[in-house]
Amino acid sequence: MAADRLAPAQASRVTVEVNGTTYEREVESRRLLIHLLRDDLDLTGSHVGCDTGNCGACSVILDGTLVKSCMLLAVQVDGSSIETVEGLAEGELSPLQQAFSDHHALQCGYCTPGMLMSATALLRENPTPSDDEIANAIQGNICRCTGYWNIVKAVKAASGQEVGE
Amino acid sequence: MSETTVSPERTVVEEPTREQWSGQNVPRKEDKRLVQGEGVFFDDVKRHNMGYVHFVRSPYAHAKIRSVDVSAALDFPGVYGTLTGDEVATLTDPFFQISSPPGAHLKDYCLAVGKVRFVGEPVAAVVAETREGARDAAELIEVDYEPLPAINDARRALDDDAPVLHDDAGTNLTWEGVFDWGDVDGAFAEADRVVKISELHFNRFNSTPLECNGALVEYNRGTGQWTLITNNQFPGFAAIMMGPAMRVGLDKLRFVTQDIGGGFGNKITSHPQLVACCLLARKLNRAVQWTEWRTDFHTSMSHGNERWFVDTEVAVKNDGTMLGFRTTALDDAGAWLRYEPLGGIIWAQVTPGMYRWRNIQLDFKQVVTNKAPVSPNRGYSRMQHLWFTERVIDIVASELELDPVEVRKRNYIKADEMPYETPNGCIYDSGDYAKMLDVALDLIGYEELDSRRADAEKRGKLLGLGIGSTLDSGTNNFGQSRLINADLQFSGNNEVATVKLDLFGEIVVTLGTTPQGQSHETTAAQVVADILGCSLDDVNVRAGHDSYWNSHAGFSGTYASQFAVTGLGAVKGATEELAGQMRKLAAVVLGATPDDIELAEGQARLKGNPEAALPFMALGAIINANNAGLPEDLDVTLNCRYVYRPPFEVPDVERKYGNLTLTYAAQVHAAVVEIDPETGVYEIVDYAAVDDCGKRINPQIVEGQVMGATAQALGAATHETFPYDEEGNLLTPNFYDYHVPHALDMPPLKTGYIESESPFTSLGTKGMGEGGGAGIHAVCAALQDALRSNGKPIVYDSFNPYERVWEMLREPEASRERVTVEST
Amino acid sequence: MLLREVGYARPRTTDEALGLLAEYEGARPLAGGQTLINVMKARAAAPDVLVDLNGIAELKGVELGSDGTLEIGPMTTTSELIAAQEARARPILGEVCSQIADLQVRNRGTVGGNICASDPTNHLPPVMVAIGARMTIAGPSGERTVPADEFFLGVYMTAVGPGELLTKVTVPPGRSDGFSSVAVGKDGTCIANAAASANGGLRVVLGCVAAVPEVIRPDGTDAEAVRSAVRAAELTPPGDVHGSSEYRRALAEVVAARATAQATERVGG
């Protein structure tokens, strides 16, 4: 749990675990979590696609919960544990990542990290989701290239269910 | 959620001699890095001590700039420096204007000079140590404006009292072209009926790629060269714009791109901001980083052309044969002409749409208004025109009480008429539109339409079916620019590829393109592997674009639905040259003639005696490291650079006649909508998309493009819009208000394909990807069909949010006022 | 996109939070951040200090009393409310929360935040008024409870004054509720919405048409009675890019009737 901060501070030390590695950084309180990840920790897999928290390209899993990292301050995650796209493959691509490739669920790849995190969160909670449940799970992730059809198919395939051709 | 039905139809049949990579759904080379978040997009790159740029932007739609005071910003901690319009006006020359006068007289700089002309226009720039610091410092820059009246409706731009945006032009009508082909008067004399439509409107929106524009720019003082790590998708164009403005040679601008998060044409006109970054990098002697935020993108970059079709008259026979039309196209270019007025001719690639009418008159007027400047947007300028022809077909069919399917079939250009020369000399290479329509109707369950309509009615819904047919013309002949401005010296097109066989047998491919998801690494590898007879893993295609590779030419980039023709044409050319050289060298080594040598399984070997073989590595080693004793006249380098040049002539400027594009992919879509009559809310309940792009190198990738274009078109039809208020503020400046489709918005989708190979391309492929907005055309038609029983309103706008449908339900007569039918 | 400098504090208790709000005049509470962070990104507001409520355990949780009354901690996220067994005492809550935006927003966005934002297009304000919720507010002068129909005072304004915090939302039991909306795309921003409650007498509440939820009192439960009551209210809804005033007025009749039908269908069920 985060250290308590009872006196307002403009900047402070943040300790956060990301994909199993612990980092410590001095950050301004106004710094968004996505910028901590991308600019301070060089974890550039999570992306910025908007400035109003609508696109989901910045989605990460925070203490087990899917969130948009542009809608959190870095200081808010002091003491927390974060999973990003960089942590999904362990030597080789995860079945989910492989399914995305098999089913052409990415074109430019910009929304893909966020999509993968949303799909990861879904499959943990619901190992055999329906098409509608998958669409609902990625409703917070905008894609402009694929039209979502292949993404839904890929997630379904990754869950081990039959998918049409 | 989607199903694919493949209906292969090859008009040119080739028997493959061995298994071919082309035509297969091979895994994408791009995926491995992208699914691991290891893509490199410009904002992922960092340089030590780089400064972050923030642009100060105009809050006024139209205003004089009285003064710009950066002194407080310069004193702010962490600020490295600033740039103002006054500096820019001395350091650079105005950007080259494509237009003839009066558009030619626009003085466009990278920052506003003297005046601002749209809300969001960059006025000054500040560079600071941190992103947040640059943003803070920007608030300290004081700009004194004198607001002027603004114009935000193109239909008012030519009123006597309309404020003029550019004194240098003296008018808001920056370009006009009158096009007249065939015998329009004769067509109207022959017509049984004349259908008049007072006004149709194609709405303003764009493709909002998820990654916005941006760059990391470094300046090398010693060589005077800039390196731009950026996502500009047409470096050839950017360089032509930037070099002369910055008074430097084009080789001083090195463009480096790797991964780009979508482009769709909206990353072609970032050159003003890139110039600003270059000037700052040089001035401040440090790398400068610019990230365009979503709001910046929406308010200032790359809107799609908004176009009215005014006073349209259609000559038609009673049986629905379309004889011709006249119309005035009023195009709103926004405040600056950056790629415009090319939109004023590019529509002419598809003058008759998919139809056989020969008599066409179009007066194209392009005006400037106090809105964001337009730029190419997926389907650029053809989409607007094709939407128009589809609306005409549908509206005329409706007024004459004819079946829109029958009217299309009656008027479609026929397969046996291909290659077909249009009234203005463009050549449609191949295609079978009627067959595509049949496939679409089959996929959508056309036979069951009546029972579906009845079922919907029981549930209180109005059901409609609509067809949207469209063309995806690809590979421009830039000679068409001369039909905009006869003094321009552009023509033809090109793309480059270099393929080499390296020392250890690696095959390395370098492209001139700048892909933003179109899978160039993969399809290029398929073509190379087929020619060289090796595996896909043997072929290494470098990711992205780098001017230093010297594997690009004047038109290099990724735009205009052409890679399968130009890019792959270059790859094929380079690889065939390489293959020829490999056979020549192997022949020397094996004591045979080149014709005796075949390339297969990663080896060069004697036909009929496969034991006598040299692995590629051996060939690479000889040329690179062990070349003593080779015949003096052996012309083998194993490093082949090929410039693909499509077969074009310079068009006839007088008659505005000539072939403007090499290939014509086509799509026919069918949409079924259900409208809730109480609210105007509608749902797309079924959808089919049929595509023909000639030979498909990778069908899965083609399907991905069809799907993406469909999704964007559906968004443009239902929710996506860039409206302005009275003061010239954009009302949808970010994703909070600008609603793009999300996963739950997508209808069930069926896709189908036929392959009509192009006789004009080296691989039989046609460029594809843009998609021509078929989804917009189909939804408009479906809505009109659904509303038919409610007073026959006509759908007159490409954009139909729920409220417009509700209006058409309440007052069908209002839209009907736009249409009259006269018997002659 | 980039925030102004701000001080950040993360108290452990409600009292500590109130103390910080009292001590720093430009301080604002930070709940789920799904509204406030956006506002700060746009620099439309720039609090001097953010008092993060996410560490205050006593503001979370959903408790079901023996009389079926629900006590909802305002820092309960909408996802948590959807998942809470207790919340099934008033099913409309979970149903409506499921329509809010997307999963990421629901995972951080809070019940209290959605209510206190008092954005006319939000989902929970009309629901709270329809079901007769009561809001408990704590401040320097102690604690008080305000019924929902006195809680919303204007756009972005509620009975929670400067230096105060919403500490509890109390919801009576009931199952005969309905909700209907027309949104921009699925689960998008509401253009019009309405909540209805038919637990002993009909209450219909419109969102999106005025600065605060508008209570409608039809004299019957049939569609025409509801629509006529909406017309009688002579609404002047705002017009914006998503809908004109006239359109919202027309939609209001439809969503009110549909919400009512849903609520009355559930009576006795």
Image (tube, coloured by chain):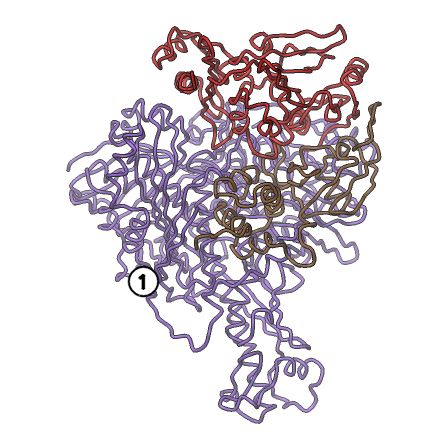
Chain containing the residue with disc 1: B
- Is B50 placed left or right of A113 in the picture? right
Q: Is residue B665 visible?
A: yes
Chain C palette colour: red
- Is B321 placed left or right of A34 in the picture? left
Task: Please tell me which residue lies in front, B53 or B446.
Answer: B446
**What residue is rendered at 82% in x and 27% in y?**
A4
Q: Position of residue B388 (x, y in %)?
A: 34, 41
Rendered position, B752 above or below C204: below
Task: Please tell me which residue lies in front, C265 or B298.
Answer: C265
Q: Position of residue C263 (x, y in %)?
A: 43, 18
Task: Please tell me which residue lies in front, B398 or B633.
Answer: B398
The chain displayed purple equals B
Secondary structure at badge 1 equals loop
Task: Please tell me which residue lies in front, B711 or B365.
Answer: B711
Dividing the image into 4 quarters, which one contains the C terminus of chain B? top left
Q: Position of residue A75 (x, y in %)?
A: 77, 33
- Is B500 placed left or right of B768 in the picture? right
The chain displayed brown equals A
**What residue is rendered at 33% in x and 63% in y?**
B9
Q: Position of residue B216 (x, y in %)?
A: 70, 48
Residue C171 sits in which quadrant? Answer: top right
Other residues around mark 1 within 10 Å, as few (<14) / some (14–19) / many (≥20):
some
Residue B394 sits in which quadrant? Answer: top left
**What residue is rendered at 66% in x and 82% in y?**
B623
**Residue kind at label 1, given as amino acid type:** Pro
Rendered position, C102 above or below B378: above
Q: Is residue C250 visible?
A: no
Q: Which residue is mark 1?
A: B419
List the single residue furthest toward the front.
C66
